[in-house]
Amino acid sequence: MNKKLILFIFTSVIALTSCKTENKTSSTEKQTDSKMTENPLLAKWDTPFGVPPFDKIKSENYLPAMREAIKRHKIEIATILNNKEKPTFKNTVEALELSGADLTKVANVFFAVNGANTNDILKETNKIIGPELTAHGDEITLNSDLFKRIKSVYNEKNNLELTAEEMHLLKETYEGYIRAGVNVEGKNKERLKEINKKLATLSINFSTNLLDETNDFEIHTNNKEDLGDLAESLVALAAVEAKKRGHDTGWSFTLQRPSINPFLQTSPNREMREKLFQGYTMRGDNDNTKDNKAILSEMASLRVEKANLLGSKTWADNVLSNRMAANAKNVYDLLDKLWPSALAMAKKDRTALAEMMKKEGIKSEFRGSDWRYYVAKVRAKRYDFNEDETRPYFEFNNVREGAFKLAYKLFGMTFKPLNDVPKWHEDQQVFEVLENGKHLGVIYMDFFARESKRGGAWMNSLRNQSNVNGFVTPIVTNNFNYPAPTKNQPSLLSFTEAQTVFHEFGHALHGLLSNVKYKSLSGTNVPRDFVEFPSQVMENWMSEPEVLATYAKHYKTGEVIPNTLIEKMNKANNFDEGFRTVEYMAAAYLDMNWHTLTDTKQRDARKFEREAMQKIGLIDEILPRYRSNYYSHIFSGGYSAGYYSYLWSEVLDADTFNEFKKTGNIFDPELAKKYRKMLASGGTKSGMDLYKEFLGREPIIEPLLKKKGF
């Protein structure tokens, strides 16, 4: 099993959801005895382009398939260990890279489906298989005999005739084993295994609680005046939600972003806004059976202990050792450079918002649940802009086509609908991806929110590109949580939601354009603080008038979004830049504070967070984008000591797009060719080396400062 697969399994286990398993285990366990030859997950996939046979896969198939795949993987590892020949790159490092193919195949599909269309059986399977996968990974990465073979090859690296990619794989494998703790000995190694297993379980419990609390909450009203000027498409969705939740009349709003954010922007009912706002911010912090405070505090403590066992002072030291940032000081330096300007801008905006509220005769203190409502009012008054004016121009299919057209302009890529391939949900759209007429891969796109899908937006790889024994093309997914179409209206997106389509599509391009030998180095298998760069840079193109004209068309009339509306939209969106930056950066600081702890004392999560925010001077009206109790990025995902990476990548994306702008052609073919080459290289080099090869220099921060108006 290659290092990246092990990391994928660990992060996938903790990133996705699970649930309570009262009296259900026995029914799932029985499937373990089923004949593996009948399990569609382990059979040969005789489907177009080798996509997963979702029409044949049942939820009960995953657990026995993964357990069987683990058994097969153990045999492959034993074969490497028992090889009597001298360790070589091919019989050890490459053999390890190619091992676990069945497990990769099954795990990729399971974690993708469990995140986007889960059910009780999948949740139960996740809870059962998570610790088992963790233990299996430890058996490999902490195997001293296996590491001896790797080290033997590594020590001879300068005498081996390896390609640059092979040398990088050798280096990544060797260093990955050291970071995992292979050199830890005796009781400490057993303790390390215990910690890994415990962290996997805690992460699953964290995400379980978060999903449950998100799905359980609603506010309901029969008074349409409470909705303000909410877009009719969203009014219709709220009515559908009310019916779904057992109400005969009225409208229901939930903690899903397509529901909560528009309500906070439009509802004149201040107390309802506050109730919904508190429902969102208190998830996992209600001192009930779904509370996450003790869980996350224990996780932070265990991470310090694990870091110490691995020879690091803090968890951040361990995590950042192979990132572009390199160490916590560099992360804090970046944050500290931008924080004063961002905070000053947010305070200035707060003054304007509070003054408007005061003019309306409200004498109470301005609070966080008022922010979005008065931002909308200021935009309307100062810029004559209402976000709902733009929604008709961002019908989701048109936005998707805009992303496709951009890929064509930059790289010659086209997208052919595949209407007859198996899907995990009927809402999915599937496309064959071609480049200059040649098959490149397949992309699944899943746009709409539902209770079976975790929150947010993300990209998965169902199959990574590789080229060891023939070229294997990639299969990727994009997943979103947008309002579904209603009977009378299509799904209309806000500008920010449209931006997210381009963002996730950037991740997809990173996977689709990959052209490397080894799958563990392909596509998005790059350092965490480099991986967001190819996605964020796409957001720059999508808002350019030249690109907007290709897709931002009124869903009824076909009229292209007017330039006057674009100008108003851009000016209005710039108004709240301070809030967006402060909200994000506060969360990045909070992440670093949790993961630069140097002792294993378990903290009072509320107190710790409050003191951390007071230290940076965060104003009361703005909360971190993710409070600790629902900070899934770092407590049930792969971003611990890494949430700063969005800002780090923002430096890269602003610098890159500035170079395109300087050419006078935002689609400049020569620069696009260099950019495509970087994407195709995947993780075959360090992020900084890739960037320097692309632009011929290290990134500079000035374009980002200018972009943010600092």
Image (cartoon, grey):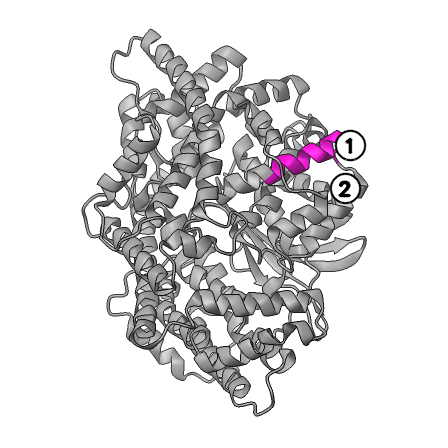
Give 147 or 405, whichever is nearer the viewer: 147
Answer with the quarter of the image where residue 97 lies.
Answer: bottom right
Going 47% across and 82% down the picture, which residue do you hit? 145
For label 1, the residue is 663
Q: Is residue 458 visible?
A: yes
Magenta span includes 584:
no
Answer with the quarter of the image where residue 182 lies.
Answer: bottom left
Classify residue 448 as left or right of residue 519. left
Can you give x and y, in whole percent of width and height, for residue 127 in the image? 34, 65
Magenta span includes 665:
yes
Q: Is residue 485 visible?
A: no
Q: Magenta segment, which residues?
A: 652-666
For label 2, the residue is 671
Can you give x and y, in whole percent of width and height, for residue 330 in the image? 48, 43
- Above or below: residue 391 compared with residue 634: above
Classify residue 454 as left or right of residue 660. left
User: Crowding near pointer 1: few (<14 within 10 Å), some, many (20+)?
Assistant: few
Question: In the structure shown, which secondary structural element does the residue marked by tag 2 occupy?
Answer: helix
